Amino acid sequence: MKKIIIIITCLVFTLALFQLNPSPAMAGKKRLVTIASGWVTGCYYPLGGSISRILFKHPEYGLRATVESSGASVANANLIANKDADFAILQNDIAYYAYNGIKMFAPGSGKNKPAKNMRAICTLYPEYVQIQALKKSNIKTPADLRGKKVCVGPLGSGTEVNAKQILEIYGMTFKDLGKVERLTARESSDFLKDGRIDAAFYTVGVGAAVLVDTAMMTPCTIVHIDDEHAKKLIKKYPFYAQFPIKAGTYKGLDKDVKTVAILAMLVTRADIPEKVVYNFTKAIFENLKTIHKAHATLKQVTLDTAMDGMSIPLHPGAKKYFKEKGVKIPAGF
Ligand code: GLU
């Protein structure tokens, strides 16, 4: 009798272990992929984290992922070009420049190199150019940034590229600023709180922790980009679109503010097998609820908008998934 009880106990225990880890055999076969994300207090990093959690929980996709934080778009394009990341999140304008080897990615233009091997999976959500400024610095338009201490974005960010383009539309370069800082998102928030800078550029999903946190701690505003300048900017750099930020989005933001936005997108490398990219894409779109819970901005990630603003050729694995789902693939991608 005692023996039977022991055997039953062992059986129950073994079954319980299987419940915790439903298919250890499959888990062993999971391919490890890397996702280059962005700032810990931005939206790319929480998105990368939620994709990694989905893959961990669902052995059927045969993947597991590690997520790296980074300066973001430009740094991530380089990680793809150098085959140091399998997947990356970056801005659709930067993806275009990187894939086509133009502007800061033009051969011989600096430390970046073209990323001809970059392939798109989908676009994700709008990232707003948000110039957060101290109320006491009295910056009403980007023109008022002249002579001010400004963080133009983290090193390797797409933000810095946007900052440069916006200043250009207002007839300025970084040389017209009093001081140019390139700080991590967390540092630039601290610098604003301490009054060590007057303003900071962030191209990031609305409601990103970095902006929310700074506004909670110190009186801040978001700088308005008027229609005339926004139109000039869009004409020169067509990836932008005009977007308003609603009053109340951040503490102290008492009026709606107009700004511009580009789109975040997910990319991979041409040499990543079709099956891997197909499963990665499927894992995301079959588990959108998990993605949506990771950050309010991520609620805008949908199948319907996955091809909006596409800027580089799609990977065959992603194309296969979207075709199966009846998503219209834009011509030429
Ligand atoms: N779009 C940002 C950049 O490349 C990164 C935003 C984020 O990490 O959420 O500058």
Image (cartoon, rainbow, N blue to C red):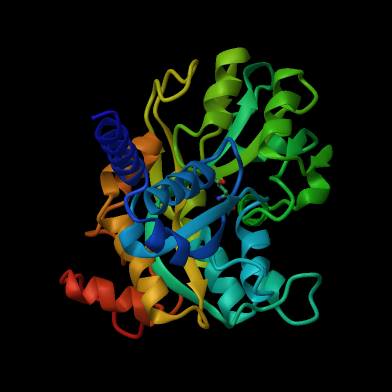
Q: Nearer the viewer, residue 56 or 165?
A: 56
232 over 5 or under it: above or below = below
Residue plotted at (40% across, 56% down): 24
Task: Left or right? Give the position of 164 relative to 129.
Answer: right
Please state the horizontal and vertical placement of residue 221, each as a whole percent of the image. 55, 24
Quadrant of the drawing holding the N terminus: top left
Task: Left or right? Give the position of 212 relative to 169.
Answer: left
Please state the horizontal and vertical placement of residue 197, each as a whole percent of the image. 77, 28
Q: Residue lying farthest bottom?
A: 332
Quadrant of the drawing holding the C terminus: bottom left
Residue plotted at (46% across, 42% down): 205
Q: Nearer the viewer, residue 208 or 286?
A: 286
Residue plotted at (15% across, 72% down): 326
On the question of residue 304 being in view, the answer is yes
On the question of residue 239 being in view, the answer is no
25 over 191 or under it: above or below = below
Residue plotted at (60% across, 58% down): 73
187 over 82 or under it: above or below = above
Task: Left or right? Give the position of 30 relative to 112.
Answer: left
Please state the horizontal and vertical placement of residue 136, each as a whole percent of the image. 68, 16
The quadrant where residue 304 appears: bottom left
Q: Residue lying farthest front?
A: 1
Number of numbered labels in the structure image: 0
The quadrant where residue 133 appears: top right
